[in-house]
Amino acid sequence: MALIFSQFSLPLSLQRKKAVQIVTHKGREQYKIICKANNKVLQTKNRVSTYQQTSWTPDFIENLESNVSMNLQDMVELKKLEEKVGAMLFAYENGCSTLQLLELVDDIERLGLGYRFQDDITRVLDKVASINESQKEDELYASSLKFRLLRDHGYSVSQDFLKRFKDSHGRLIGCLKSDVKAVLSVYEASFLALESELDLQEAKLLAKELLLKLSGNINDEVTENYLNLALDTPLYRMVQRLQARWHIDIYSKRKDANNLLLELAILDFNMVQSSNTRDLQQVSKWWENIELSNQLGFIRDRLMECFFWGSGMIFQPRYDSCRIVLTKVCALITSFDDIYDIWESVDELEVLTNAIKRWDANAVERLPLRLQVGFLALYNSINRMACDTLIIQGKYILPTLAKVWGELCESFLLEAKWTEANYMPTLEEYLDNAWVSASGVVILTHGYLSLNQEDTIESLEKCQELFKWSSMLLRLYNDTVISSEEIARGESANAVSCYMRDNDVSEDVAREYVNTLIDKAWMKMIKARNACYDISAYPIIDVALNLARVAQSMYQFGDGHGAPDARANYRVLSTIVKPITIKEEKQGHFS
């Protein structure tokens, strides 16, 4: 049976113009409510901002139902398929080549099934890592795939495999041009390079150059899709649920597709989405109950986008409480970011900051009503989270939470003071504060403490380097969407403007430099992640990595959080709203 997906599944950036129009029309037809967002002028006494109203109303969220209901029979079938795939993996382990085994693991993970087979994959990779195989010169594809999978799972591996594919002058062999599979494999592997691994960084540049030349000139549709998807977003930097959705689409078109894997991937995707929808509806009720967006008319209502952050960081159904906490935290951070951005009195913001640092409700008694409302919404929400953790885990975490919120608001306050004084800091001065104001440490601290880790506070301290670089990436990706008009006005500090001023260069040069900072930050985060494997357990490492991945996706084509457009709404539709449906006809049809 041929397996064919509708064009809805592929990312918009990889579809032809006609396909985009079809998708947009279909989205309007089926989900009319998401297209009714208008701009809203937000104003305090002296400052004005224009924000787009939410595309997703509470009624829309409340009425969300999976087009594919996951009943008991589906769950039983899913369990049977999982057992069959586990048996297949075991059979491959004992009867197939190392390359075939690695390719199966790669497909399992790309299809979003890796979390179901963690122990099996670890056993397989332990075995692969212990084998010292002598690769032939034409096995660059296999060598780079092995490197990528092992490093991705925290194994100590070297870039030295590339030496076998260099000429006498130390340059990568030019015959790569005729091996698209090998070029793609090297390109994907190169995104796990460390700062000291110059060979991998060189390989990335060469592979990208070759892929750009090959794009549009490949007869095979599947290979062309893989190539364009890699150029759009490499595997290691892609949001996992988006990766699963798009890979299911491409995988279904492969001649060697394993229908067992494909069927499990589709059922799993819909099951995860259905489970996450219930979490979204729960957190939506919380957001309505605290009435922050109603009482503070100048803040953005971005609950759905915040849930995209939360579910992007940790999607597995078993971590529902963590996902809900992360979504709430993101919504509160968005609100306080707006408060510090638009509130006209820095003196009143200073009082608010001190109250948060002291975690003292009495300290806001003389502040304006709206600041009191904002403080109490934060105060009550965080106290509730701390109380829940105390009841469930027996751990008192409120001082730790209050500390990170105090540090975040202190960084917000400093930026407000810079804006008030029309002060443009140096890039170094800016980044020293900006990685904190990006809020990654607050998000990840909440995530860590909600995951019931052992030796909570002690291990948390050891994760700070990982948290820092994840938060730095969040800041740098955010700064890449600053508009030319905002830069020209010079109203607030950002990485692009600071570098332009420091070095007297053009905006284009500054943006290119920020992109190099992003690549360096990824390499530093990978190094920090490798160190954490010795001191901290899954899944907090993945949560930190996934925060950076969601940031890359959210800001790839514009401000998908502050001003979500059709592409941002499409990502939400793909992962949160629209399941994969199957129509049994003469040909299989998934949409």
Image (cartoon, rainbow, N blue to C red):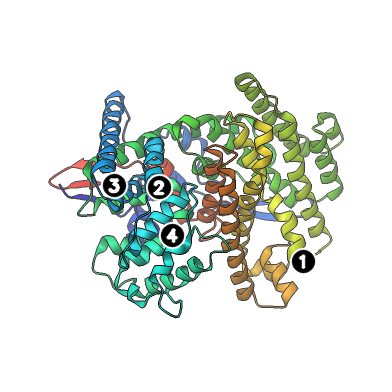
Q: Position of residue 343 (x, y in %)?
A: 77, 49
Dot 3 falls on a residue whose secondary structure is: loop
**Nearest to viewer (mark 2 / mark 1):** 2
Mark toward the start of the polypeptide (1 vs 3): 1
Q: The residue under label 3 is which amino acid type?
A: Ser
Residue with the mark numbered 3 = 591
Mark 2 and mark 4: Cα distance apart in space: 20 Å
Q: Residues within 10 Å of mark 4 (few under 14, many from 20)?
A: many
Q: Is residue 129 visible?
A: yes
What is the residue that sits farthest to the left in this orientation?
586
Nearest the eye: 254 or 552: 254
Dot 2 falls on a residue whose secondary structure is: helix
Q: The residue under label 1 is which amino acid type?
A: Thr
In the drawing, what numbered circle is on residue 130?
2
Residue with the mark numbered 4 = 189
**Nearest to viewer (mark 4 / mark 3):** 4
Q: Residues within 10 Å of mark 3 (few under 14, many from 20)?
A: some
Mark 1 in CB contact with mark 4 (< 8 angstroms): no
Mark 2 and mark 1: Cα distance apart in space: 48 Å
Mark 2 in CB contact with mark 4 (< 8 angstroms): no
Residue at image x 44%, y 32%?
317
In the drawing, what numbered circle is on residue 517?
none
Q: The residue under label 4 is which amino acid type?
A: Ala
Residue with the mark numbered 1 = 426
Against 405, is 423 above or below? Answer: below
Dot 4 falls on a residue whose secondary structure is: helix
Which quadrant holds residue 441? top right
Q: Position of residue 105 (x, y in %)?
A: 34, 46
* Side of 42 where 79 appears, left or right: left
Mark toward the start of the polypeptide (4 vs 3): 4
